[in-house]
Amino acid sequence: MQKINSVFFGEHGITSTSANHLSNLAKELIVAYESKINNLNFVTTRIDIVGSQSIEGKIIQQGLTEKNLHEVKEALEKISILNAFSAWMREAIKAKEEEGKLIKYKKFEEWLEENNLELDEKPDMDDNEYDSTDVISEFTIRERNEYYYYQAVAASIGKYIHPKGVISEARAQLHNCILKPYSAKGEGKDTLVLSHEPSVDVAVLDELFFELQKWHRTNEQKLNQIKYAVKRKLSEKEIEKNSTYKIKCEQYKSRKEELMLRFKDWQLKENQKIMNLKIVIPEALQEIYDYLSSFEK
């Protein structure tokens, strides 16, 4: 509780409801006393009718006499003490409402700080990209060499044995020359007849070509196995990252819910304390309090 407000409350006193009721009663009495003050008159007025036998005339307004002047002071004293009582009660009620608002509108973060409690910031998804380069960087010397070797072999053999590759084209020419051992160039008497004959046994070349194809396929399989392992590692890392993020989110949520429950419980208890606060009656206002309370009996 704020120090400026604590003066109004104590173990013994009255409730806000009673304070408000007595304050309203005080206001009504103030109105009554003020009417007396507002209608003060120190002049007695008489009316006399011409020809009347009366010596002094008829009094139509009686002014206060000296012996009644004490009533003016008493009325002012009552107004003052009633205003003082009403002011005390109004300020006490306002202070109580203010303390209630401080609890009601207390920010969760402020409560955490005041109670030396911590709630980590909400976790963010790890945005660091883990790619194939990172996986390859974790390879052993043997694994890295195999990866580069299979890549090199695939590139070296592939460009020669694939369609339109040098070896593939040369093999096609060999098979063509067997089917067409002769060809001609030019026309008429300038015609040249070219004779074509294999320089290697077709079966031997085919055997080499198929052997190269087999080697290429085997190499491709091994290279693809490594690439698949890299993809699988990336997938595992992604699953691990998502799992870690999920766990952190659940931990954060659980911790926040726990602290939020404690915060709400604190608010309820503090509100109850404020509701139970008793407004003390200063010694100087005890007499007027007893007087006002007598109207309720």
Image (spheres, rainbow, N blue to C red):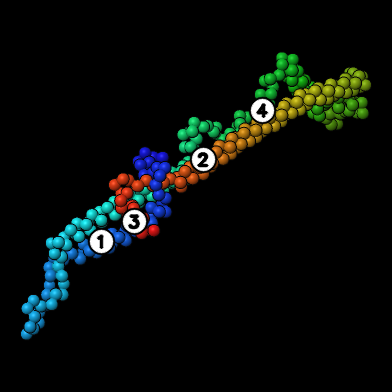
* CB atoms of marks 1 and 2 within 8 Å: no
Dot 1 crowding, Cα within 10 Å, few <14, some 14–19, many 20+: some
Q: Sequence order check: which comes first, mark 2 or mark 3?
A: 2
Residue 116: horizontal and vertical position, in percent?
49, 31
Residue 109: horizontal and vertical position, in percent?
49, 37
Q: Sequence order check: which comes first, mark 1 or mark 2?
A: 1
Q: Which residue is mark 3?
A: 292
Dot 2 crowding, Cα within 10 Å, few <14, some 14–19, many 20+: some
Q: Secondary structure at mark 1?
A: helix
Residue 251 image-quadrant placement: top right
Q: Nearer the viewer, mark 2 or mark 4?
A: 2
Q: Quote the CA–CA distance across marks 4 and 3.
A: 84 Å
User: Is residue 145 among the parts visible in the rendering?
Assistant: no
Q: Secondary structure at mark 2?
A: helix
Disc 4 residue type? Asp
Disc 2 residue type? Trp
Q: Which residue is mark 4?
A: 131
Q: Residue at x 15, y 75 (%)?
A: 60
Residue 124 marker: none
Q: In the rendered image of this protein, does residue 297 appear above or below residue 221?
A: below
Q: Sequence order check: which comes first, mark 1 or mark 4?
A: 1
Q: Which residue is mark 2?
A: 266
Q: Quote the CA–CA distance across marks 3 and 1.
A: 14 Å
Q: Sequence order check: which comes first, mark 3 or mark 1?
A: 1
Q: Sequence order check: which comes first, mark 2 or mark 4?
A: 4
Q: Quote the CA–CA distance across marks 2 and 3.
A: 37 Å
Residue 33 marker: 1
Q: Nearer the viewer, mark 3 or mark 1?
A: 3
Q: Quote the CA–CA distance across marks 2 and 4.
A: 49 Å
Name the side, left or right, on which 206 lies relative to 155: right
Q: Secondary structure at mark 3?
A: helix
